[in-house]
Amino acid sequence: MNKQVMMTGAAWMAALGLLAASYDVTAVSVVLVHLKHIWGLTVGETANLTAAPLVGSVIGSLAAGLFADRFGRRLLLMIDFAAFVVAAGLAALATGYDSLLLWRTVMGLGIGADFAVVFPYLLESVQPRKRGATLAFVLLINDVGQVLAYGAGSYLVSQGPDGFRWVLAVGAALGAVVLVGRRSLPESEPWRKEGLRSFSGIGRQMLRLKELKTAGSSAILWFLHQVTGQGLTLFLPVIISLLWNETAGQSGTTSILVKLLSLGAGVLTVYVIDAWGRRPLQLAGFLGRGLALLPLGLSVVMGYRMPFWVAGTLLSVALAFGAMGPDKTTVITTSERFATPVRSTGQGESEMVGRLGGVFGVLLFGFFGGGTGLGETILVFSAVALLGALLTGLTLPETAPSRLAAAASQAVGID
């Protein structure tokens, strides 16, 4: 493991929480291919089930961020995962579309709340010179959860009519382990010293010009990443099944192969994020994703069937660039840019807007990309990623402590 990574108990609990959450959100992408047949789901219903956790997370992120700045990080870290575990377990027992939609939405409340609190908490628990690598490692586990979902989903969903229930139950079991482990976490020491103990105080600081500018730019960049990130990840097995007419099990297995490059990109990020900085990684990530998706979308629109290895490589590259850049940096830079008293509130507000981007990406693909509009939807994802690269270059400051220290040294003439 990279010597710069400080995997404390807090970091492991954050990592395992992301593993459970990303597994459960992604697993439905394999399950839906199966449920479309046994429940007779419409295109709109499959889109709604995929978007449900993202819709719930919009509400959960804003509320939890504010309450974590007011009442402390630890309390919210327990409450949000308790809600996740209960909802994930009930989703596995769902008897039809309506109940599955309800419990996946509630599950999203817990996931959104956790993202708004766990990264500010983790940032406040790790030494500044090690936090980039540590947070990037934790976010890498998010990719591991997605690969686990594709693998477990492709196997379990083929084990009969109730196989999908076992797919969803695994997420609930992972969440229960995290909930037990989090009982021993201490409260954030920076929050103890600097936290504001009133909603009015938090509100006044968030209305300062600096915090408003930070919230606006972070939210827009997070939104643009989530449009492509959620749209591609949650529908990857569907994209593969449309491109190559694969079954649910086959598309899940192929998704693992396509996703593997993302894991390598995430590992690279852990090693270089503090030395290279956040800004160049995010710029390269958006740009690489946009350029990789462009020829794939054009080929589908023009009716040209790309060979498996060509289309698969383009998908892999698009996912890998996102995993190397904005998938990590939009979360990390948001936490780093806000002051301690409003860090969770700012993270929650930015995440809320970002999750709306995820909802947009999922619904766009669900209603249009799942049929004759596949090529056009991929082109929209490409354009959004390229816009993200442009705005990163124009608005994102560098937040890596090592890079900031180097720039300060050069400014005063220190070699």
Image: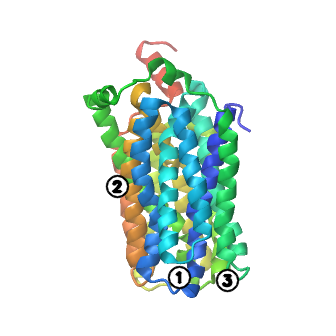
User: Does residue 11 appear in the picture of this structure?
Assistant: yes
Category of crowding for the residue at label 3, using alpha-carbon neighbours closer than 10 angstroms: few (below 14), some (14–19), many (at least 20)? few
| Viewer-proximal residue among 99 and 133 | 99
Q: Is residue 279 left or right of residue 125?
A: left
Q: Is residue 93 left or right of residue 54?
A: right
Q: Which badge, 2 or 3, is on the more N-terminal residue?
A: 3
In the rendered structure, which amino acid carries the disc numbered 3?
Pro
Kindly identify which residue carries mark 1.
242
Residue 222 percent coordinates (x, y): 41, 49
Q: Nearer the viewer, residue 248 or 178?
A: 178
Type of amino acid at the residue the image marks with label 1: Leu
* Crowd around label 1: few <14 · some 14–19 · many ≥20 (10 Å): some
Residue tagged by mark 2? 387
Indicate the secondary structure of the residue bearing disc 1: helix
Q: Is residue 206 left or right of residue 335?
A: left
**How far apart, in angstroms, are the residues tagged by discs 2 and 3?**
43 Å
Secondary structure of the residue carrying tag 2 is helix
**Quadrant location of residue 394?**
top left
Front in this rendered view, residue 46 or 298: 46
